[in-house]
Amino acid sequence: MLLWTLFPIYWVTVIATQNSSDLFSKVSLLPSSITLQHLLDIFAEDHYVLPLFNSILITMCSLLVVLLFGVSSAYVLGGRTFKVAFKKTLLIWILLVRVLPPITFALPLYIIMNNVGLLDTKLPIILAHVLVNIPLVIWFMIGFFANVPDEIVESARIDGASEFQIYARVVLPLVVPGIAAVTILSFMASWNEYLYSVIFIQSPSDFTIPLKLATLNSEQELTEWGKVASGGIVSLIPVILIAMLMQKYLMSGLTAGAVKE
């Protein structure tokens, strides 16, 4: 399974590091030549730095909003401290946003952003990513908050902690593995999002990585396989880095050592 999963990445790397002449002369699992020219070309000729910066900016902004509102909403809806009216109905509506295809919200969002004059900005993309990812965070984190032992919360409340202190200093450290998981999933969903980028982005200066990769694979550059592969390799690096950074939190226990006997 590992070989099956990693082979496409290896093959793209082989294409990205071969000379253009070798790509059309013969096909081999082992690279017959090694070059970084394709990687240099996408930054020098195709200005790949700007789409990379746009993707990082949009992804991080949407991720911060999603984690801030999604995790706190899940705490209110999943915990037993707060009484929320029509909780089940509200959860069904939140889930419905996630279940419906993203294209369902494209036209309403486009009309709203056009009426307020925000189409030629990055804000519509950020809001669209928040709309898609926040139901995932809420539903994923509800289960983690529901499994936090009541004894821990009650002990903090007896010690005089406020509700915000209980949330920020007691409960959140216990659900770090869940936050790490939704961070990775939300980051990947936002980083790879293509549909809303095509609809809302109007200026080449606002292109994201998926949109830039699509232009690299256009009819005019159909034979530039090395550049397309190099762009794909660069797009993988941030996802791999954030997965490596979050790995230790994913492997830790949910509430290991939280309760002292």
Image (spheres, helix red, strand yellow):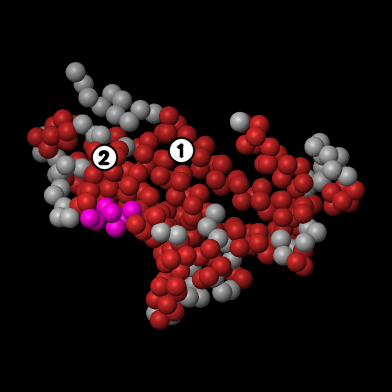
Q: Position of residue 222 (x, y in %)?
A: 77, 61
Left or right: where 120 falls relative to 84: right
Q: Which residue is mark 2?
A: 145
Q: Secondary structure at mark 2?
A: helix
Kind of residue sitting beneath label 2:
Phe
Q: Which secondary structure type mostly characterizes the magenta part of the structure?
A: helix
Q: Nearer the viewer, mark 2 or mark 1?
A: 2
Kind of residue sitting beneath label 1:
Met
136 falls in the magenta region = no
Q: Position of residue 151 (x, y in %)?
A: 16, 30
Q: Which residue is mark 1?
A: 246
93 falls in the magenta region = yes
- Quadrant location of residue 108? bottom left
- Residue drawn at (42%, 77%) of the image: 111
| The magenta segment | 89-95
Residue 243 in the image: above or below residue 100: above
Q: CA distance from mark 2 to mark 1?
A: 19 Å
